[in-house]
Structure formats: structure tokens, C-alpha cells
Amino acid sequence: MADETGSPNKPIKIHRFQIGLNVILQVAIIIVLAAMVNYLGFEHYRRWDLSRDKKYALSDKTKHFLDSIKGKVRITVFFGSQNPLTGDVQNLLTEYQYASRGKIDVEYVDPERNLTRAKELFDKYKVVTDESVLIVDYEGRNKTVKASEMADMDQGNPLVGEQPKVTAFKGEQAITAALIDIVEGKKNTVGWVTGHKEPPVSGESPVSVLKTFIENENITLQELNLFEVPAIPADLKAIVIAGPQYDFSDREMRMLREFWNKDGRILLLLDPAAKTPRLVAFLGELGVKVDDDRLMAMVKTGIEEVARVRDVVAHFLPDNPVTKRLAAVRAPFFGSTSSLTLESQQVAAANIHLAPLVQAEKGYWGETDYYSNDETLLQFDPAKDKGEPLTIAASVEKGGSADERVQINSARLVVVANSTFIQDNALTQDQQGLDFVSASINWLLSREQMIGIAPKIPQTLTFVLDEKALASLRWIILVLMPLVPAILGLAVWWRRRA
């Protein structure tokens, strides 16, 4: 019987054209997807530094500065293959190239293998040292960075065959400082006021760490004694008054007010223990009242022990260009600290804008009986003491614009009710104080792109073991470590025997 649906022997028609077109289309899609993946991977890739001390991760300040560079930077590296810093320098410069988004070109020249090229570049840049160097070149200006500036080295004992080793790699500090110097060109000069028993910045200075830190940002700190000049020099873009122990004279105050009225920039660090009524009155005219108190807190030192502390731990506020990039940071302010009251309404008509920058952590209060030795008086009394929030640093701007993108001439001032936190003996743990002072000075100089967390000061990782820890370590090495393979071996032997 015939199949009504059709003949079973009829051949199936193969649509070769459709199949070929489908294959071509699939191949094209795969090629496009592969190209897209490669493009995204090349243009928008990310890098992570998983090392313990983040040796190659660039700091916030370096990244912001690289974003501000307009032209092309060329870095030529003269490091031999045997130099212990070569690998670190290459890895670090890779991070610079990535962060700069094509603004930095790097050429590596091994002076031991490529003598002709090395001699050509040495003659071009007038290099006269035998030390390994890298040269940063920008628009005809160049600066040499030596290997000795990029690391602290332990030379070891050559008599017993010890090789030199790197104890602290400071490559980012050195390279970023060189970049700032050549990109900005002329140095910014800041006056450091003396004559009232402020710490000097020359000679045996108690603020040498701060001086080095600030001058690495293309800033020169120049001592300025107001007794010796008729007016604050016009070439000074800003001045720093750091912890005067004696008050300013009437003549000096006139000079200070004239400087302020000519859009001057001032960083004022007050010592609450010093009597400076004229300076305090000047701040009062700007709406900043220095309170007659000292910040204190009660902290637990044991299960049932409580101690009173006068050193202040504070945090930076995010709603101001000075501290917004430090907003997640806590900083210690050692020494006497008083609180500040900002009277914004009283100076609003004069176009003066006030903003708190730093506030003490919870638990502190402003004690008015700070000279007393009576423990019953050194307790928080809401009737006479000041409670939270406690502002210890503020910014003042006369004129200017609320929009950070708009640059308008204005007078600027940063006041901190503590002056000892910048001294060397107070900067032994971390550098939050340095970052804050740097941010303040750069804001005063209208260099907002330089505000941020700077490259960290390298610290050597050390372990301290007491007698108990040494005893435990001895048992682990002499007993536990040999015992583990012995037990495993015994288990294997017993299993085979069974």
C-alpha cells in the first residue's frame, strides 16, 4: 500500500548555502566577541598589589598628580641586571605607566651591555655619576634620581660573603618628587615665621621630618623673621606660623592683616599653653573662637583601671577640599589641644566661609579646669565644659567660590589648636599628621591636585619574642616538627605491615 504522506525513498534536500552562511555568521560573531574582550582587557584592565606592604601600589597623591599632567613624560632607566633594585624599579614604573594612561614612556638601558646608547644619553643629560640612575624628562626639563635615593641598603658583611640587600624601598617617594619638580618647574616658596620661639626649619630642627616631607613636593620652606622685614615678601605664596610661644607685636599684626587682606594664605598652629591674645583676637575677627579648655578623655587601661589622657585621637571630615581625601583616616594629635568654636553667622556678611576640618573622636570633652589637680574637677561637667562635637582644626576662606572647579582669588587660612603634632618625636608611628599638613599647605597654594595620602614612610618589619614565646618556638622546632613526619612514617609502616 502506498504511503499517502510521500515516498520514503525521496532524498532530503540539504541547504548548503544556509549552512555556510550560518557558519560564517558564527565565526564572525566569535571574532567580534574576541576582539571586544581583547579591547576591554587592553583598555580597561585592572591591577592589584597583593604584597604585604603594598610596595608597588601607588599612593592616592601620586595618582591624582599623574592625572593632572598635561604633556608627555619620558623616563630613562640606567640600571644594570645585577643591581638589586632593578626588579623593584621596573615593577614600580609599570604601575606609573598604567596609572598615567599613556602619559609616561619608559626606556630601559643597561649601561653594561649597551654602551653606545648609554654614552649617548649620558652626554645628552650630562650624567657624571657611576651610580645607577633614572632620568625623568618633561618638556625639556629633566631631573636625575639616583639609586641611593630610592632605597635604604644593608651592605652586609662582604668578609663572610653577604650580599647587599634592600631594607626599605622608597622608589615612589623619589620618582614622584622628581615628577613634581620638573612638571611644575619653579618651586613654591612658603615662609616659616620665626622670632616667637617657633621651632626652626634650619640646622638641628625638631621638625626635620616635616621639612623633608613638604620640600619633596616642590616647596621650599624659607625662614621669615617679621622683625627684619618691612612687610611680608610678595614672592611668598603662603606663610606658616607653627606654635609661637610669644604673642605678635602690634607692628607684626598689621603686617599679618595686610598680608591677609591681599589674598594671603596662612597656616596657623596654636599652642594652647602659650599666651597669644593678639593672634587669638585676629582669629576672632575671622569667626574662629579659640576656647579656653583642654581636650581630655577617660580610657580603660585594664579590666578595672581607667586613665585620663590628654593626647587627642581625631578624624578628618569629608566635606572640605582640604580633608575630603583623608576622610577615612584617624590621626593622633599629641600634646595640649583646645577646641575651636566656629561663628559662621557673624562673618557671613563679610563673605568669609568657615569649615571644620578635624574633630576629636567620641569620648573627649573640653575641660575648663585643666590646671586643677583635683580629680573631682577633672570630670565632664555639661554646665561649664564643652561636649561633642569638638572641632580642633578649621579652614577660613574670604572670597572664593563654593564650586571647587572655579578658581577665584581669595584669602585662605587653616588653623589648628595644636602645634606639637608636627614635631619629629610625634611622627614616629604614622604619617597622618604629615598628610594633613601637606593637604593644608597645598590647599593654601591652590594645588588641590596635590592633596591626598602620600607614599608611606617605609618601616622595617620586626618581631619581638619574649621568653615564653621563645620557649614555645623551641618546642615547635625541636619536637613538633620532627614528630609529624615520624607519626606519618609510622602510620605508613603499620598499614603496609597489616
Image: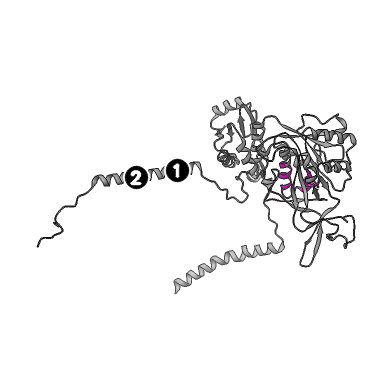
Mark nearer the N terminus (2 vs 1)? 2
Question: Residue drawn at (54%, 32%), measured in percent from left and top?
Answer: 113
Kindly tell me whether residue 423 is visible in this rendering.
no
- Label 1: element kind: helix
Q: Amino acid at mark 1?
A: Asn
Q: Residue furthest front?
A: 349
Q: Position of residue 93 (x, y in %)?
A: 58, 39
- Residue that label 2 marks: 27
Question: Residue drawn at (90%, 59%), measured in percent from left and top?
Answer: 373
Kindly tell me whether residue 116 is visible in this rendering.
yes
Quadrant housing residue 82: top right
Q: Which residues are magenta?
A: 414-439
Quarter of the image with the C terminus in it? bottom left
- Label 2: element kind: helix
Q: Nearer the viewer, residue 428 or 369?
A: 369
Q: Nearer the viewer, residue 134 or 180?
A: 180
In the image: residue 376, left or right of residue 461: right
- Numbered label attached to residue 38: 1
Identify the coloring. one colour
Q: Residue furthest left?
A: 1
Question: Residue drawn at (69%, 50%), measured in percent from left and top?
Answer: 329
Q: Nearer the viewer, residue 471 or 147?
A: 147
Q: Position of residue 231 (x, y in %)?
A: 84, 30
